Image (cartoon, rainbow, N blue to C red):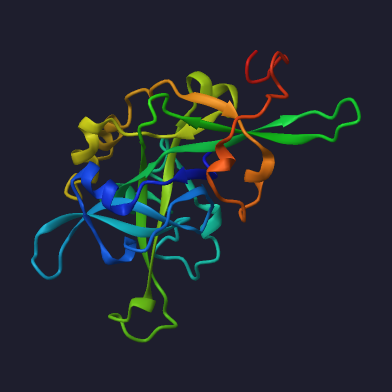
Amino acid sequence: MCGRFVSTSSPSDIAELLRAVVWPSAESLAPSWNVAPTDPVAAVLERVDRGTGELTRRVEALRWGLVPSWAKDAKGAARLINARVETAHEKPSFRKAFAARRCVVPGDGYFEWKPVAAADGRKAFKQPYYLHRPDGGPLLMAGLYEYWRDRAVAEDDDPAAWLVTCTLLTTEAVDAAGRVHDRMPVTLHPDHLDAWLDPELSAPDELRALLSTPAAELAIRPVGTAVNSVRSDGAELLTEVADPLAGVSGGHYS
């Protein structure tokens, strides 16, 4: 799964890269080296503009952790930060969004953890690793988004009445990622971006075919445990440290 990731590109840079416009909700988004569940994230999606009637590709701020439209409340969002690509098209929480509300969440990379057993007077702990493209380019993580109506707010046109949330699709991990965790985010090939964002495309088989391209080899490095706290942020979280599992059977480098 992907439970933390890095997003340092500005909304305007994302818009330029993916041929989108920055929506007001995303204008104040700041870079984060430790995006955590329920944080706002920059997502690219396509929707019909109410003013012009035209389909618009835009960068919006969505809350990470999907709340299904039928949910009684928004309390379960932190549990739905990921959706398995193998089953998202049929699961009640995700199938409507899979058919019509898809997005891309650009990220610099993401974190995963691997247990380190107690030894030599040291307590057991989980070693964090940072996974990213070797060339430094963005990961175009495939996501789904959903609108949830807060019935405690009387008027539909009140912005407080609506919560827009998202989840990241995950798949079986390959290459370096598979040595740290058995799941990894689904990343889109740039050639599949237009089709994935097209709200008119709804056939599950066609959509799943867009996600079948194997992920590129990822670079991986051990980083300090400061990232374990959601309150930690800053580029220093990506500083490489000695790997306690180097050379250990079942470890990162074995």
**Would residue 4 be seen by someone viewing this image from the given angle?**
yes
Instruction: Say above or below: 210 vs 46.
Output: above
| Residue at the image point whose x is 19% and y is 40% from the top | 194
From the viewer's perspective, tell me whether residue 150 is left or right of residue 238: left
Instruction: Say above or below: 158 vs 116.
Output: below
From the viewer's perspective, tell me whether residue 178 is left or right of residue 206: right
Residue, far bottom: 154
Residue 54, quarter of the rendered image = bottom left
Between 166 and 221, the residue placed more toward the observer is: 221
| Residue at the image point whose x is 73% and y is 15% from the top | 248
| Residue at the image point whose x is 35% and y is 32% from the top | 137
| Residue at the image point whose x is 48% and y is 23% from the top | 219
User: Residue 249 at what x, y percent from top left?
Assistant: 72, 14
From the viewer's perspective, tell me whether residue 242 is left or right of residue 199: right
Between 105 and 219, the residue placed more toward the observer is: 219
Residue, far right: 121
From the viewer's perspective, tell me whether residue 57 is left or right of residue 176: left
User: Residue 209 at what x, y percent from top left?
Assistant: 27, 30
Q: Quadrant of the C terminus?
A: top right
**Would residue 89 be seen by someone viewing this image from the given angle?**
no
Q: How many marks?
A: 0
User: Residue 35 at what x, y percent from top left?
Assistant: 51, 50
Between 24 and 57, the residue placed more toward the observer is: 24
User: Residue 201 at what x, y percent from top left?
Assistant: 19, 44
